[in-house]
Image (spheres, rainbow, N blue to C red):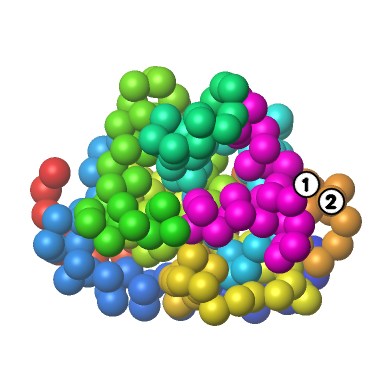
């Protein structure tokens, strides 16, 4: 884990190791039913938090600028899908629609673009209610079609998304930012019990956050514990 406090880091690293081992055993039965780790040609880092405005996008941008990752989240697939199904009636191009989403993603009730966040949540949940892995499967297919090698996913919101990233051999970072508001929407709290590979605390400046991301990338083998060997032996062969 990376927090900037050496004493706290030692304690947090130990806690992360204990919880991750516990999590791997807890997830083992699920892995046996088809979610085992598979050999993957892509390097995926998923980023999640409780609530929005924690710094997930900022971390993904550091991965893109400093480490050549492509920022491509599950919601990007959904936004494309939504454009061709519905919003193209209002927006002249896909890029115009995507720019509007980005500009208004934090709008509150009464703001011009508040409807965007509401629409995206409802649209995503609708397809998830039909096929739980609808967006996950489309995301993976699109990553393959575009031949991405290193992907940063800044909007991991549900356990099935986290499972897919881990199945591909990826890592999951939880970002914690003190003081942010967390509502009770499933898209904001569904990952609250998921144990990450590493925690990055966003309790300083944007520059400090960037330094913590770079520290994580330089020491990820030490900071991220691998799946316990006894759990690996229980996973199905791909």
Using the rendered image of the protein, determine whether residue 112 is visible from the camera's viewpoint: yes
How many marks can you see?
Answer: 2
In magenta segment, residue 97: yes
Q: Does residue 114 lie above or below 17 as drawn?
A: above
Mark 2 residue element = helix
* Range of residues picked out in magenta: 95-121
Locate residue 161 relative to residue 229 in the image: left or right: right
Using the rendered image of the protein, determine whether residue 172 is visible from the camera's viewpoint: no
**Structural crowding at the residue carrying mark 2, measured as other residues with C-alpha within 10 Å and reported as few (<14), some (14–19) or many (≥20):** few
In magenta segment, residue 93: no
Mark 1 residue element = helix
The percent position of residue 166, horizontal first and vertical second, equals 36, 52
Is disc 1 in contact with disc 2, using a CB cutoff of under 8 Å?
yes
Which residue position is annotated with label 1? 210
The percent position of residue 105, horizontal first and vertical second, equals 67, 50
Locate residue 44 relative to residue 63 in the image: left or right: left
* Real-space CA distance between mark 1 and mark 2, rounded to the nearest whole angstrom: 6 Å
Q: Residue at x 70, y 30 (%)?
A: 65
Q: Which one is in front, 72 or 124?
A: 124
Q: Residue at x 63, y 42 (%)?
A: 101
**Structural crowding at the residue carrying mark 1, measured as other residues with C-alpha within 10 Å and reported as few (<14), some (14–19) or many (≥20):** some
Q: Does residue 73 lie above or below 199 as drawn?
A: above
| Residue 10: image tag | none
Locate residue 43 relative to residue 215 in the image: left or right: left
- Give the prevailing secondary structure in the magenta stretch: helix
The percent position of residue 108, horizontal first and vertical second, equals 72, 63
Which residue position is annotated with label 2? 206
Q: Which one is in front, 96 or 162?
A: 96
């Amino acid at each position: 884990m990376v927090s900037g406090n050496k004493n706290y880091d030692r304690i947090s690293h130990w806690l992360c190791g204990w919880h991750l081992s516990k999590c791997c055993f807890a997830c083992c039965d699920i892995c046996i039913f088809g979610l085992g780790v598979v050999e993957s040609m892509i390097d995926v880092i998923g980023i999640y938090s409780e609530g929005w405005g924690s710094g997930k996008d900022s971390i993904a941008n550091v991965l893109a600028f400093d480490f050549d990752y492509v920022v491509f989240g599950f919601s990007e697939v959904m936004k494309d899908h939504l454009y061709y199904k519905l919003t193209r009636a209002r927006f002249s191009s896909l890029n115009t629609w995507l720019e509007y989403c980005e500009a208004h993603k934090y709008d509150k009730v009464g703001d011009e673009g508040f409807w965007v966040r509401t629409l995206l949540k409802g649209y995503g949940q609708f397809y998830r209610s039909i096929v739980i892995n609808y967006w996950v499967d489309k995301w993976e297919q699109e990553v393959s079609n575009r031949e991405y090698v290193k992907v940063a996913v800044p909007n991991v919101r549900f356990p099935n998304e986290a499972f897919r990233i881990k199945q591909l051999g990826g890592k999951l970072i939880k970002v914690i930012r003190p003081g942010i508001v967390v509502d009770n929407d499933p898209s904001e709290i569904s990952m609250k019990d998921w144990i990450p590979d590493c925690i990055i605390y966003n309790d300083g400046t944007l520059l400090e956050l960037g330094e913590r991301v770079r520290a994580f990338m330089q020491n990820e083998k030490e900071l991220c514990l691998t799946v316990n060997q006894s759990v690996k032996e229980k996973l199905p062969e791909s």
